[in-house]
Image (cartoon, helix red, strand yellow):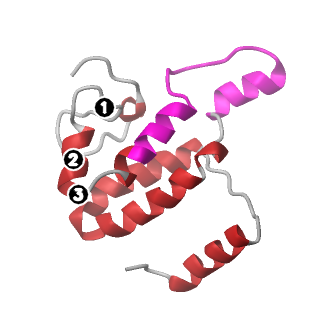
């Protein structure tokens, strides 16, 4: 099921030795879009990756602009997306039984990832907090 067992072994070994991983928000965007593009064929493998990401959720970095605002001492925010939204998205994939369940859950009322179809939106709007269908 794993495409590259050697890579998985390296990550598992590094984790066991106490290495910490950080996850950049743009990476989360690409991974989540990849779940939809991979479809049912790759969902089981993608789910394993998101289950691992869930264990690393405390290590998700801030979006670049708010991070720089903190470093430079001025508030700077362009969207309502924050780390908690990424954690919820990780849980959405990790908690889905299969790809069909994922599609159903991502389109449900209150989901943080809602689009007009089952295709991903490649704009930043796919990551905005939705309050209306």
- Residue 17: % across, % down: 76, 71
The magenta segment is 63-91
The residue at the point 67 percent across, 51 percent down is 22
In the image, 113: left or right of 14? left
* Relative depth, front residue between 67 and 99: 99
The residue at the point 21 percent across, 33 percent down is 108
Pointers 2 and 3 in contact (CB under 8 A)? yes
Q: Residue 99's mark? A: 3
User: Image quarter for residue 126?
Assistant: top left
Q: Residue furthest bottom?
A: 6
Verify whether residue 97 appears in magenta. Answer: no
Q: Residue furthest right?
A: 72
For label 2, the residue is 103
For label 1, the residue is 111
Verify whether residue 88 appears in magenta. Answer: yes
- The disc, 3 or 1, on the residue closer to the chain's N-terminal end is 3
Q: What secondary structure prevails in the magenta region? A: helix
Distance of label 3 from label 1 (alpha carbons):
16 Å
């Amino acid at each position: 099921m794993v495409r590259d067992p050697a890579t998985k072994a390296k990550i598992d070994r590094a984790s066991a030795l106490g290495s910490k991983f950080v996850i950049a928000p743009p990476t989360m965007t690409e991974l989540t879009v990849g779940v939809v593009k991979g479809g049912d064929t790759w969902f089981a493998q993608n789910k394993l990756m998101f289950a691992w990401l869930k264990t690393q959720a405390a290590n998700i970095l801030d979006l670049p602009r708010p991070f720089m605002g903190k470093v430079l001492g001025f508030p700077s925010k362009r969207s309502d997306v924050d780390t908690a939204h990424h954690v919820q998205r990780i849980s959405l994939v990790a908690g889905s039984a299969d790809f069909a369940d994922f599609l159903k859950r991502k389109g449900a009322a209150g989901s943080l990832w809602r689009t007009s179809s089952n295709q991903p939106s490649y704009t930043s709007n796919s990551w905005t907090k939705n309050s209306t269908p």
